Amino acid sequence: MRWMAAILILPALCRAGDLGPVTLPAPQKTGGMKLMQALNERKSTREFATQKLPPQVLSDLLWAAWGVNRPDGRRTAPSASNRQEMDIYVATADGLYLYQAKEHRLQPVTSDDLRGSTGTQDYVKQAAVNLVYVADLAKMGNGSAESKAMYSGADTGFISQNVYLYCASEGLVTVVRASVDRDALAKAMHLRPDQRITLAQSVGYPKK
Ligand SMILES: Cc1cc2nc3c(=O)[nH]c(=O)nc-3n(C[C@H](O)[C@H](O)[C@H](O)COP(=O)(O)O)c2cc1C
C-alpha cells in the first residue's frame, strides 16, 4: 500500500515546489504587554506595511493563536469538546503553509502567494501574513451541519481574539475578515471537501 500513499502525497509535494517544512523558533511564552493594556489597545486596522514578520514574531503569533500550552496537548484557545477541529493556514509572500501546533512548525502546501485570494478587500494582499481559519469537519463527530458551523465559528473567534491581543501587545496590526470568496480560496488552497473556511485574518506591521 506504500504506492497508494505516494500517489496521495506526490501532488502536494509538487505544489509545494522547493518549499520545505519550516521549524519555527521556540515561542517566547513570557513578557508582552499587560493584559488590561492589550485589551485597551485591541482594534481592527486595514492598512499594512509590506515588511515581513521575523521568524520569532511568526512563531509567537501562531503559538499565541492556537499553540499547545499544556503537556496533554491542549491549546491556547478553547474548542468545543476539545475536538481541536480548527487549522490555521498561513499565507505569506513565499507560499501557503499549514501550522502544525504539536510540532510547532509550518508544513508547506503550495509555493503560490495566495495572500490576495484570502479576501475580497484590496489591503489584504499588502499584509505580510494572512491567516486562514479552516474547520476540519471530519474531527467534529456526528452533529448537525448547523451545530458544526456554530461550534467552529465560536472556536475561530477565540483564536482570532488571541491574535488580536498578541498584535496589540507586539505593535502589529490586524483585522479579522468574513469577506472571503470561500469556494475560490478553498480551491486555490487544495482543501478537502470536508474542510470549511470560517474566517481569515490579516496581520502585519503598521503602515507608516
Ligand atoms: C465575524 C467578523 C467578520 C468581520 N469581517 C470583516 C471583513 O470582512 N472585512 C473587514 O474589513 N472587517 C471585518 N471585520 C472587522 C469588523 O469590521 C470590526 O471588528 C468592527 O468594525 C469593530 O472594529 P474593532 O475591531 O476595531 O473594534 C469582521 C469582524 C468580525 C468579528
Image (cartoon, helix red, strand yellow):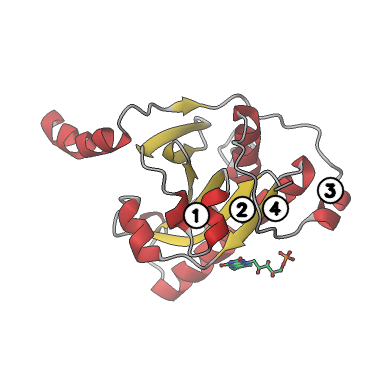
Residue of label 4: 164
Residue of label 3: 35
Identity of the residue drawn at 62% across and 38% down = 51
Of pointers 4 and 2, the one earlier in the residue sequence: 2
Q: Is residue 49 left or right of residue 102?
A: right
Residue 84 position in % (x across, y down): 50, 50
Residue 133, labelled with which disc?
Answer: 1
Counting the numbered discs, the total is 4
Q: Nearer the observer, disc 4 or disc 2?
A: 4
* Front residue of 7 and 90: 90
Identity of the residue drawn at 82% across and 54% down = 41
Residue 98 position in % (x across, y down): 44, 41
* Front residue of 138 and 126: 126
Identity of the residue drawn at 20% across and 34% down = 10
Residue type at mark 4? Tyr
127 in relation to 110, above or below:
below
Measured in 3D between alpha carbons, the distance from the residue under mark 1 to the one under mark 3, in whole angstroms, is 24 Å
